[in-house]
Amino acid sequence: MPRIRPTRPQMEILAWLAIFVLLFWLSWSFHWHEDLDEFIERHHDYPLDHALLALNISGFLGLIYSALRILDLSREVHRRLQAEKNVDWIACHDTLTELPNRRFLDSLCAQAMIDQRAHETYAVFSIDLDGFKKVNDLLGHDHGDAVLKTVAQRLSSLFPRDRVFRLGGDEFVVLARRSGNSEPVALGNRIVSVIGKPFTFNGVAADLGASVGFALYPENGDDLRQVIRHSDCAMYVAKKQGRNLVKPFVASMQDEMTKRIRVEADLRSAIKKAEIFPYYQPLVDLKTNKIIGFEALARWKTASGEFIPPNEFIPVAEEAGLIVDLTDQLLRRACTDALSWPNDLVLSFNLSPIQLSDRLLGLRILKILGDVGLPTHRVELEVTESAIIQDAVTARIVLDDLVNAGVRIALDDFGTGYSSLSQLSSYRFDKIKIDRSFVSSFETNDKQDKVIKAIIALGAGLGVTITAEGIEEESQLQRLQDLGCHIGQGYLLGRPAPLEELTADKAGVKVSQRR
């Protein structure tokens, strides 16, 4: 058994008790009491007996006082120990959900109970909530906090014998012992099911999903920290592929995560240094063959001269929360460039689907236009069908604000997403853009040809301009002109180019550069 060491106050009490016993033994052995009585008797003229009585009383009172101070000291020590425990608890727990935090997880990874000698196996689940930002934006942070507390309670109920951690934001980690639990895939699906149950607070309902990735210890790494990183890789893949998915870790995911981290770091640096530029592709009137405007397309050229395709860095910007800064930077530069064009040319600019869930988007766009001095009627914003579906309420508010301010709205990639006539009748679109996938094959595919005819007829009936993307052949151009398509865009009519290289060949007009 381990030896119990006495505390410092206990040591002091023992020391004083030893001194008392020693003095008492000496007085007993050498008859100090009789000697003191004889001394007082010989000097009875002096009030020594009263002085001795006063000394005894003061000593007794001093003893009581000392006992009270020792009791106070003991209480203070206890309070201090409790305060230290509370500080340790706060440092190792999330104050909102009361779950262990990242610091606790790091300390747990270092303990002997989870090393190889413990022969314990774990399934590590990394969980990210789908749609949590929408709850915060639409319902407020109080509802968001309530959602996080409820998620913590649901996960703790699902894993009563295991550790559930909140690492920050809407990220959770579960360290589940594999002995006595279901298979990891089944557990992952139960996590999705539990979190996917509706949340209702004060009569307001919120719908959330979860992206779950998991890795196994020790199969996916002999270091638990490494296994947690692998489960995070799997979660990232699940989130990237859709909503409410469960993905196990495989080795190839690590390469993808490493590449993404590198691209994200480079992208942050490029945005900070304003190294991503707009290139401009002509929009041509198919009746007059004149350029009526340009679409701004993001182009990222690295220091080595390599171009990073937009379909690689735009998703990273969206996932890393960089899309707002990137869009504002590109739009401001494009609007500044557009000031150098003839006043009848329009600037077309793409909006990310994620941004249409931001109620402040319209205000930021209008502020940029106001700062630069570009009239709103010269700006055309392109949105996709999927962007409107993701958050229809907020999308309507944002688009209505922009339309009321005089900005034109184009429905991009029409026919490839959630095409619906109700969208065309509900929103005030100025233009419909036929996706390049239809244009590339409509000459040899009778069904595609009929789809394009129907879209053009629909535009004519609604009074909406129709633009065809991806025109690369003269025969495609001629066929679209015969069908009555209004505007064309593609490599045949002009490739994307920086401002310095812009020409209006078909219009016979050089774009002025007054910057």
Image (tube, helix red, strand yellow):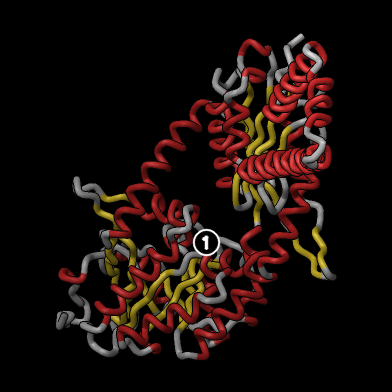
For residue 130, say whether it is visible.
Answer: yes
Q: Position of residue 53 (x, y in %)?
A: 84, 39
Q: Position of residue 172 (x, y in %)?
A: 65, 43
- Quadrant of the drawing holding the N terminus: top right
The relative height of residue 172 versus residue 408 in the rendered view (above or below) is: above
Where residue 292 sits, quadrant-wise, is bottom left
Question: As drawn, is 58 to the left or to the right of 387?
Answer: right
- Quadrant of the drawing holding the C terminus: bottom left
Q: Secondary structure at mark 1?
A: helix
Q: Position of residue 409 (x, y in %)?
A: 48, 80
Total number of numbered discs in the rendering = 1
* Rendered residue at 43%/59% (across/down): 322
Q: Mark 1: which amino acid?
A: Gln
The relative height of residue 263 versus residue 384 in the rendered view (above or below) is: above
Q: Front-most of 427 and 34?
A: 34
Report the residue marked by disc 1: 448
For residue 157, say whether it is visible.
Answer: no
* Rendered residue at 44%/62% (across/down): 323
* Rendered residue at 80%/11% (across/down): 29
The relative height of residue 438 versus residue 486 in the rendered view (above or below) is: above
Q: Front-most of 426 and 274?
A: 274
Question: As drawn, is 328 to the left or to the right of 32?
Answer: left
* Rendered residue at 60%/42% (across/down): 238
The relative height of residue 93 versus residue 275 in the rendered view (above or below) is: above
Q: Position of residue 197 (x, y in %)?
A: 81, 52
* Disc 1 residue crowd, few under 14, some 14–19, many 20+, Cα 10 Å: some
Question: As drawn, is 95 to the left or to the right of 109?
Answer: right
